[in-house]
Image (cartoon, rainbow, N blue to C red):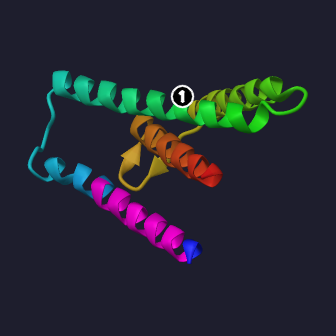
Amino acid sequence: GGGHAGILSVSFNTLLMALASGLGGVPFFFVRKLNKQWLGVCNAMASGVMVAASFGLLQEGFELTARGDGGVWRLFLGVAMGLAFIMASQQWLEGHDVEMGDLKGLSARKAIMVIGIMTLHSFSE
């Protein structure tokens, strides 16, 4: 039935996304140190992807909350809560000496933020 095709489609697309994510790391097996200019380009590309994804999530959030009274305010409240969480997390981490595996200091804080953000981001999906 229709449910079966939906499950197969979601499973297939999830597998494709997982493979694409894994393949994204392949170049780093061949490059030991990325020069700062290319690192800047890579960071800008990642930023562009995140901004585009954010706009997609905002649009979906608007469509889901805009119905009824105060929908737009709920959307703004959600965005403000997300921003406040990130800012509070960064401030809290800066006040603590953290380690994560072999990472220490700023590198560990960045890794913790990325993992935390990606984990929380996945909950809504």
Q: Is residue 49 above or below residue 101?
A: above
Residues drawn in magenta: 4-20
Secondary structure beneath dot 1 equals: helix
Left or right of 77? Residue 16 is: left
Residue 95 seen: no
**Residue 9 occupies which quadrant of the picture?**
bottom left
Is the magenta region chiefly helix, strand or loop? helix
The one of 76 and 65 positioned closer to us in this rendering: 65
Question: Which residue is located at x 74 percent, y 29 percent?
Answer: 75
Instruction: Provide the residue designation for mark 1.
Output: 55
Q: Residue furthest front?
A: 1
The one of 117 and 60 positioned closer to us in this rendering: 60
Q: Position of residue 83 (x, y in %)?
A: 65, 27
- Residue kind at label 1, given as amino acid type: Phe
Left or right of 72? Residue 58 is: left
Total marks placed: 1
Question: Which residue is located at x 25 percent, y 49 percent?
Answer: 24
Q: Position of residue 125 (x, y in %)?
A: 60, 52
Q: Mark 1 packing: few (<14 Cα in 10 Å), some, or many (20+)?
A: few
Q: Is residue 83 above or below residue 7?
A: above
Q: Is residue 16 above or below residue 52?
A: below
**Residue 40 occupies which quadrant of the picture?**
top left
